[in-house]
Image (cartoon, grey):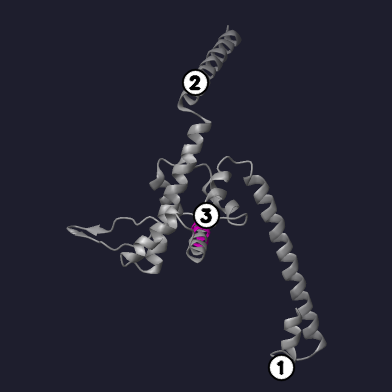
Amino acid sequence: MAEIYALAPNGIPSLPNSQSVKIAIREAIKMIHSTEESCNTILAQMQALCKVLPEYSVVRDMNCIGDVLAPRIAEIGDVRRFKNKHSLIAYAGIDAPPYQSGSFNASERKISKRGNTYLRKTEYKIMQSLIQHKPANDPVYDFIQKKRSEGKCGKEAMIAGLNKFLRVYYGRVMELYSDLYPPSKTRIKQAFEILLSYVSFVISCFQCYISTA
């Protein structure tokens, strides 16, 4: 703030020095502060909700993802609802759909951008943070550098990094869930649910029979 006041006397004003302008500026500053406080409150609520999720620890362990970006990965939701990692990539809209006509098959294709826009923007910020901080032995950053060494431009290398990030994330979270819910326990749970459904069906049929008898 002291630096701003020091530069102000030598600055060229773009607004008239009137009372109405001063009031408008003060109100604009109040709105900025109010918006910032609201954003911080919402972010704190997002962090509190995300910390109870098992995959939150996986997100925080990944490089260049702090308390601000980590809750935004919640846009992915439960990864178990995706058939495979390719489905997750398509959900983010960074897949390149095939483009062909007859014998022509395009070798250079653009991403579809048909998925979750907010998730895609969050991933771009993560890639920018990785490129800025250059973490050592990071699979995503190393993959971006590999693509750059192959002649890919910055944007193409970043999109490749986005794909790599989602593949790594999907693999780590699925591994976490397989440890938390082993297949044997999952099958027992499913069998128990089927048995409960069957018992409920039998009871409802019996009740219908009694009511009509």
Is 8 left or right of 163, judged from the image as shown?
Answer: right
Look at discs 3 and 1 and give the one toward the viewer: 3
> Residue beneath label 3, please?
63
> Residue beneath label 2, please?
188
Residue extending furthest toward the right: 19
Q: Is residue 204 above or below residue 65?
A: above
- Mark 3 near mark 2, Cβ–Cβ under 8 Å? no
Res 114 seen here: no
Residue 31, position in %: x, y? Answer: 74, 70
Image quadrant holding the C terminus, namely top right
Q: Residue at x 57, y 49 (%)?
A: 60
Residue 178, position in %: x, y? Answer: 48, 33
| Real-space CA distance between mark 3 and mark 1, rounded to the nearest whole angstrom | 44 Å
Amino acid type of the residue tagged 2 in the rendering = Ile
Query: Which region of the structure is painted magenta?
Result: 119-125
Q: Residue at x 50, y 64 (%)?
A: 128
Amino acid type of the residue tagged 1 in the rendering = Asn
Is 164 left or right of 63, judged from the image as shown?
Answer: left
Q: Residues within 10 Å of mark 3 (few under 14, many from 20)?
A: some
> Residue beneath label 1, please?
10
